[in-house]
Amino acid sequence: MKSIVIGDMTVKVADSKWSSSRIISDRDREMDKRAKAAVKAAIQKAKICKKPIAGYDLETKKAFVENPDGTKTYVD
């Protein structure tokens, strides 16, 4: 687990190896599961409605907008 400072707050971030331990509560695991499902549903709805979708390319480390036709426009 690592800590990240955002302004005057410190946030603890747990990676996947911590999720199976007791550091992350069952309620937190359930909240994470629901949040992931909500994001997937929102992306799917945007695709159905032919809306652009923002994303992040881990290889190039750049943000992009995926257009309804499948083309990606990278943001500088």
Image: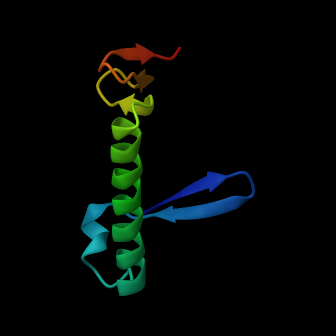
Q: Position of residue 37 (x, y in %)?
A: 34, 61
Please determine whether, in this image, residue 40 is positioned above or below residue 10.
above
Q: Position of residue 67 (x, y in %)?
A: 39, 21
Please determine whether, in this image, residue 39 is positioned above or below residue 29.
above
The residue sitting at the right extreme is 8
Name the residue rendered at 66%, 52% in the picture: 6
Q: Is 70 or 4 nearer to us in this picture?
A: 70
The residue sitting at the front extreme is 49
Q: Is 68 or 60 nearer to us in this picture?
A: 68
Q: Is 33 or 24 nearer to us in this picture?
A: 33
Please determine whether, in this image, residue 58 is positioned above or below residue 36.
above
Q: How many marks?
A: 0
Q: Position of residue 57 (x, y in %)?
A: 34, 28
Q: Position of residue 58 (x, y in %)?
A: 32, 31
Residue 10 sits in quarter:
bottom right
Name the residue rendered at 44%, 28% in the picture: 52
